[in-house]
Image (spheres, rainbow, N blue to C red):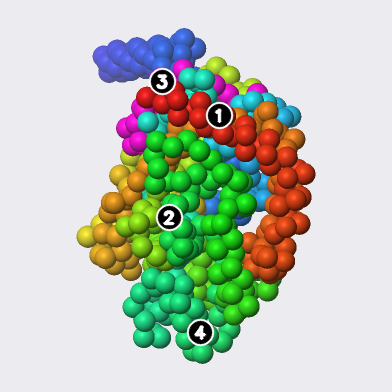
């Protein structure tokens, strides 16, 4: 009897094991079948190479290869690689070589280089891809007007990136306000104020230099010279009067009285020591002195206050910068180029899904506060924190993406040491400005490409020493203008005038 009961229990146990085993096999087969049919299989990611300029920090190298790569891959299924080139290769050099040899990448551009590259077939037409995948860029970076800047013959060749008050970029001087206050001054309104500040600062800090980052640009003195013309330099060689919005006349800037007057002031500054002896021959040394907190002045712009404080405070923790306009801004208002910051162009042989992936990538980086914080500051809690008042507290001191690149007033954060006055000044910077006359204009240099190359060579050899005050204007200008004429300046200005007038005649 006992034996029968034992056999019955054993039979039930064996049956249960067989049933359970069969259920397990059925489940495994179903999972295998689901994997093979790929009910939710993800598409293979497209690849993208993002070229930046300068030198990536140690943290940036790690960030780009890991957190940034992985977050982009998860968000838009793009396998992105970040590479750096020296700034000397921007808009020419190795960049142009890579474009000409068919390498696939995206990087920033400007309107002059855009026209050159489109004429040579180096940039991809992004019109259709942008219509599908650049909605955030249109919303956050200036709308349709922002996109129009980067169109040629109705086709879009670059994606606008950033959105910031930019009136008077390179028309103001940025100075060390903390040292200005130390020496008992409150403002810089005249050329004499600049000279007085330099003299007092040198007494207190003998190792300080004057002008540094950005070199010398004569338009910094536009408001100080005795001229009714509000000089708008369309490029190095051509200018127009910004105060005459209906006038399409352009001029040879280097032959103008405005250039002469600026050079006379700069020559005086050079003799006084405001311009270091190596400013022309070794700009990187001037940049290094600036970064180390040993320079008083640089070429100014609204946003550079924050960029430069971030940079210089690593060496000089109390450094404060402020933009100063030398002259009467009511007579010569600052000129604004709208929301323009920079733009990204894609090399020409990128096509199809891959091109769409590039557009998705650039769109993503200006899509939200989260993404702008991520590329600028890194991982919250690891690289930075946000205070209760919304200001930044950095943990990591290494730069990730350069702060100027994604600068967008819609997503702007400020370091904890930035003052309320600095913020209000920046956010209202464009008030009272006038629009640049060339908004939407792209000069096609192709008809005068030979002349342009020769003019650039003449500029570097003959005009830069005058511009930086190392040689006297009256002594050197005759030979310099003759070289400029021999290089084809008349043809160049005539072609520019023709295209600029056509643009004006057809403007909406």
104 or 505: nearer the eye? 505
Tell me: residue 18, above or below residue 137: above
Q: How many C-alpha atoms fall within 10 Å of the one at disc 3: few (<14), some, or many (≥20)?
A: few
Please say if the residues under marks 3 and 4 sit with CB atoms less than 8 Å apart: no
Residue highlighted by disc 3: 131
In the picture, measured across the screen, residue 135 lies left or right of residue 91, that is left
Frontmost of labels 3 and 1 is 1
194 or 254: nearer the eye? 254
Q: CA distance from mark 1 to mark 4?
A: 47 Å
Q: In the displayed image of the protein, which residue is found farthest to the bottom?
A: 203
Secondary structure mostly seen in the magenta stretch? helix
Please say if the residues under marks 1 and 4 sit with CB atoms less than 8 Å apart: no
Residue highlighted by disc 2: 228
Q: Residue at x 28, y 51 (%)?
A: 431
Frontmost of labels 3 and 4 is 4
Residue highlighted by disc 1: 499
Q: CA distance from mark 2 to mark 1?
A: 25 Å
135 or 305: nearer the eye? 305
- In the figure, residue 15 lies in which quadrant? top left
Residue highlighted by disc 4: 199
Magenta residues span: 121-144
Q: In the displayed image of the protein, which residue is found farthest to the left?
A: 388
Q: Residue at x 66, y 65 (%)?
A: 473
Q: Position of residue 439 (x, y in %)?
A: 43, 36
- Along the polypeptide, which appears first: circle 2 or circle 1? 2
**Mark 1 secondary-structure assignment:** helix
Tell me: residue 398, above or below residue 206: above
- Along the polypeptide, which appears first: circle 1 or circle 4? 4
Frontmost of labels 2 and 4 is 2
């Amino acid at each position: 009897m006992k034996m029968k009961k034992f056999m019955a229990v054993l039979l039930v146990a064996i049956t249960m094991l067989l049933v359970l085993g069969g259920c397990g096999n059925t489940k495994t087969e179903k999972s295998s079948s689901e994997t093979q049919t790929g009910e939710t299989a993800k598409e293979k990611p497209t690849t993208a190479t993002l070229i930046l300029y300068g030198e990536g920090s140690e943290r940036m190298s790690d960030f780009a290869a890991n957190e940034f790569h992985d977050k982009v891959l998860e968000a838009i299924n793009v396998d992105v690689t970040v590479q750096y080139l020296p700034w000397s290769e921007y808009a020419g050099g190795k960049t142009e070589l890579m474009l000409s040899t068919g390498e696939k990448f995206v990087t920033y551009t400007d309107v002059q280089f855009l026209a050159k590259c489109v004429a040579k077939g180096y940039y991809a037409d992004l019109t259709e891809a942008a219509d599908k995948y650049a909605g955030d860029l249109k919303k956050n970076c200036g709308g349709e007007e922002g996109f129009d800047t980067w169109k040629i013959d109705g086709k879009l060749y670059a994606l606008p990136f950033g959105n910031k008050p930019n009136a008077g970029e390179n028309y103001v001087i940025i100075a060390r306000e903390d040292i200005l206050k130390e020496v008992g001054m409150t403002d810089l309104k005249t050329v004499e104020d600049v000279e007085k500040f330099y003299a007092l600062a040198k007494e207190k800090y003998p190792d300080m230099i004057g002008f540094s980052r950005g070199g010398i640009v004569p338009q910094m003195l536009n408001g100080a010279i005795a001229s009714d013309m509000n000089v708008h330099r369309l490029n190095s060689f051509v200018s127009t009067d910004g105060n005459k919005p209906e006038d399409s006349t352009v001029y040879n800037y280097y032959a103008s009285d405005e250039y002469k007057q600026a050079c006379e002031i700069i020559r005086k500054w050079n003799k006084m020591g405001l311009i270091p002896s190596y400013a022309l021959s070794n700009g990187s040394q001037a940049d290094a002195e600036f970064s180390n907190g040993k320079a008083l002045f640089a070429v100014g712009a609204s946003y550079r206050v924050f960029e430069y404080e971030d940079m210089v405070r690593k060496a000089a923790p109390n450094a404060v910068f402020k933009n100063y306009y030398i002259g009467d801004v009511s007579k010569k208002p600052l000129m604004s180029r709208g929301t323009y910051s920079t733009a990204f162009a894609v090399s020409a042989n990128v096509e199809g899904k891959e091109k769409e992936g590039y557009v998705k990538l650039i769109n993503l980086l200006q899509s939200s506060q989260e993404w702008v914080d991520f590329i600028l500051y890194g991982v919250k809690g690891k690289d930075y924190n946000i205070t209760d008042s919304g200001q930044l507290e950095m943990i990591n001191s290494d730069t990730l993406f350069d702060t100027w690149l994604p600068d967008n007033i819609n997503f702007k954060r400020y370091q904890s040491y930035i003052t309320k006055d600095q913020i209000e000044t920046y956010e209202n910077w464009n008030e009272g400005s006038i629009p640049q006359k060339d908004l939407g204009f792209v000069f096609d240099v192709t008809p005068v490409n030979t002349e342009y190359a020769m003019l650039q060579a003449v500029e570097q050899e003959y005009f830069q020493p005058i511009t930086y005050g190392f040689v006297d204007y009256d002594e050197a200008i005759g030979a310099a203008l003759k070289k400029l004429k021999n290089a084809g300046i008349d043809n160049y200005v005539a072609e520019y005038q023709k295209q600029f007038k056509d643009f004006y005649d057809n403007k909406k």
